[in-house]
Amino acid sequence: MITKTRCFWVSKDDQENVVRRHVEVDVEALAADHVRIRVSYSSLNYKDALAATGHPGVARQLPIIPGIDAAGTVLDGGDTNFRSGQEVMVVHPLFGTEVNGGYSEVVQVPSSWVRPLPEQLSARDAMAIGTAGFTAAQSVVELERHSIKPDDGPIVVSGATGGVGSCAVKLLSRLGFEVFAVTGKQEQAEWLKNLGASEVIGRSEVNDLTNRPLLSARWAGAIDTVGGGVLTTILRSAKPYSCVTACGLVGGTDLRLTVYPFILRGVTLQGIDAANISEARRGAIWSRIAGDLSFGDLSPLISEIDSNGLDDAIETMLAGKTRGRVVIKM
Ligand SMILES: NC(=O)c1ccc[n+]([C@@H]2O[C@H](COP(=O)([O-])OP(=O)(O)OC[C@H]3O[C@@H](n4cnc5c(N)ncnc54)[C@H](OP(=O)(O)O)[C@@H]3O)[C@@H](O)[C@H]2O)c1
């Protein structure tokens, strides 16, 4: 009988400073319609790094155990349809933000937040993909929905060495697209090319500081993960009837634009919100990830740490220095 769980705890000290430590907490009695899971793997997403700083827009309560992704084995399915030993993952917008998340050996969540792990994926693979990989897949699906095809021209991916960006580079290249990877880490150019990028370009090359409403049209599509000046530049250099997806804000939240990309080139700006996508669409995208939208060999993307390495990994991510996906063995 499990009575305690070790977890990564974010709280405030007496001086109101946010502190992070590893603690043991009691495992509560299993509530009705809840599932108790032994977490084998979690992952680090930008949202987790923000939650670990106590960012009020992400960590809606303190103390909190961050971790928006978790995969593992059912310990107790209670009165639900889940059975002990079943391999599962947890996906829900409140997990790791409003309620305790996956950086814990044991979690208890409502059954509606639990999905059986796709047969084709191990818990480690599912977490290597995690929210970042799902977001990349959702972005690719949006390009498809706008009928963007490899023959239409190159796709640009910003924040290319980050979690979402690197997953997008891999997925797009596997689908036969010519991928231009935008990065602030030129030293990772070879790694990006091995992931499938055709060209690697520096971030400053895709951050036009002029006020020109339109730039020469280059991109048939784009997966932007950084926002700000990079997204503005991409939109102004998007080809007629291209689609640009936007999911991130690490490069800024402002969009200084005119309407010209939309009314003179028919460009679509497609927002991506992986957290609040409908369950039906979420299920359909995970099915595709386990099928025709597979990531193939995930190992080049993965850096594996244990929970003791979380603090350093969070600082690295906040400094914009993460490469690929950080998987946490709990
Ligand atoms: N909307 C959604 O549903 C959703 C879901 C998942 C993630 N997100 C967002 O997507 C973004 C990426 O998440 P992630 O988990 O992939 O984070 P990540 O692994 O930390 O990747 C972010 C990457 O952005 C680049 N970058 C960092 N600072 C930058 C700056 N000041 N200007 C321009 N680029 C910068 C870096 O890549 P390079 O050095 O290669 O340029 C960095 O590795 C975050 O904003 C996150 O909140 C949104």
Image (cartoon, rainbow, N blue to C red):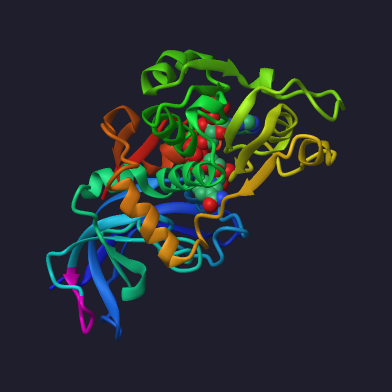
**In x, y percent, where is residue 180?**
54, 22
Q: Where is ligand 1, by quadrant?
A: top right
Does residue 82 sit above or below 304 in this rendering? Answer: below
Q: Is residue 234 visible?
A: no
Would residue 208 appear left or right of 27 to someone viewing this image?
right
Q: Is residue 78 left or right of residue 244?
A: left
Task: Please say if 160 is above or below 101.
Answer: above
Report the number of numbered marks: 0
Residue 134: x %, y % from top left: 42, 48
From the viewer's perspective, is residue 263 above or below residue 91?
Answer: above
Quadrant assignment, res 228: top right
**Up-down relation of residue 56 to residue 308 (above or below):** below
The part of the chain drawn in magenta is 75-81
Dominant secondary structure (helix, strand or loop) of the stretch shown in magenta: loop
Identify the image quadrant of residue 67: bottom left
Q: Is residue 118 left or right of residue 232?
A: left
Q: Residue at x 54, y 67 (%)?
A: 61
Which of the pair 13/135 is nearer the observer?
Answer: 135
Residue 251: quarter of image = top right
Q: Position of residue 320 (x, y in %)?
A: 55, 32
Looking at the image, which residue is at 48% across and 28% down?
A: 150
